[in-house]
Image (cartoon, rainbow, N blue to C red):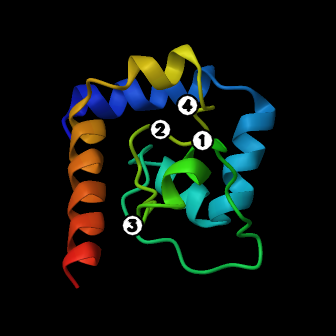
Amino acid sequence: MKHEEIAFAKAIYESTSAEDKEAAKKQVGSLLDRALADHPVFNQIAPMSKNVSFMTGSTDVADVSWNVPTAQCVTATWAYATPFHTWQAVAQGKTGYAHDAMLLAGKAIAATAIE
């Protein structure tokens, strides 16, 4: 990541609520404190944890998955604690780290389909 993007991601993290920060900490545990020191976008594989829960989403996919196999891959397209459907999420959409994560997710899903 470029220095400007790291600074931007840190500013986004600082703009999020205490509740969102606490939720992020529950997802990645002690990794969060160490990572925030120099890299505010998750850049490692999180170990399985008892804190991991089912991620809900739109029910629209049920209509599609009935006929077509579907897959989901979670990658770090924004800074820690960025809430969904917010200006913080939108503001990070054109960053290099968001683009890299999007490509990684696409490659993972494509490789899974090929296999």
Q: Sequence-wise, which precedes: disc 4 or disc 2?
A: 4
Under tag 1, what secondary structure? helix
Q: Is residue 112 above or below residue 93?
A: below
- At a point 41% along the width and 61% down the height, the residue shown is 68
Q: Does residue 64 appear to the left or right of 113 in the view shown?
A: right
Location of mark 2 (residue) = 79
Number of the label disc, if any, that sits on residue 60: 1
Quadrant (top left/top right/bottom left/bottom right) for the C terminus: bottom left
Q: Does residue 8 appear to the left or right of 54 in the view shown?
A: left
Q: Is residue 99 above or below residue 87?
A: below
Alpha-carbon neighbours of circle 4 within 10 Å: few (<14), some, or many (≥20)?
many
Under tag 2, what secondary structure? loop
Under tag 4, what secondary structure? helix
Location of mark 4 (residue) = 13
Location of mark 3 (residue) = 44
Give residue 18's quadrant in the image: top right
Confirm or deny contact between disc 4 and disc 2 (CB under 8 A): yes
Q: Sequence-wise, which precedes: disc 1 or disc 2?
A: 1
Alpha-carbon distance for marks 3 and 2? 13 Å
Confirm or deny contact between disc 3 and disc 4 (CB under 8 A): no
Front one among 88 and 84: 84
The image position of residue 105, as x and y in percent, is 30, 57
Alpha-carbon neighbours of circle 2 within 10 Å: few (<14), some, or many (≥20)?
many
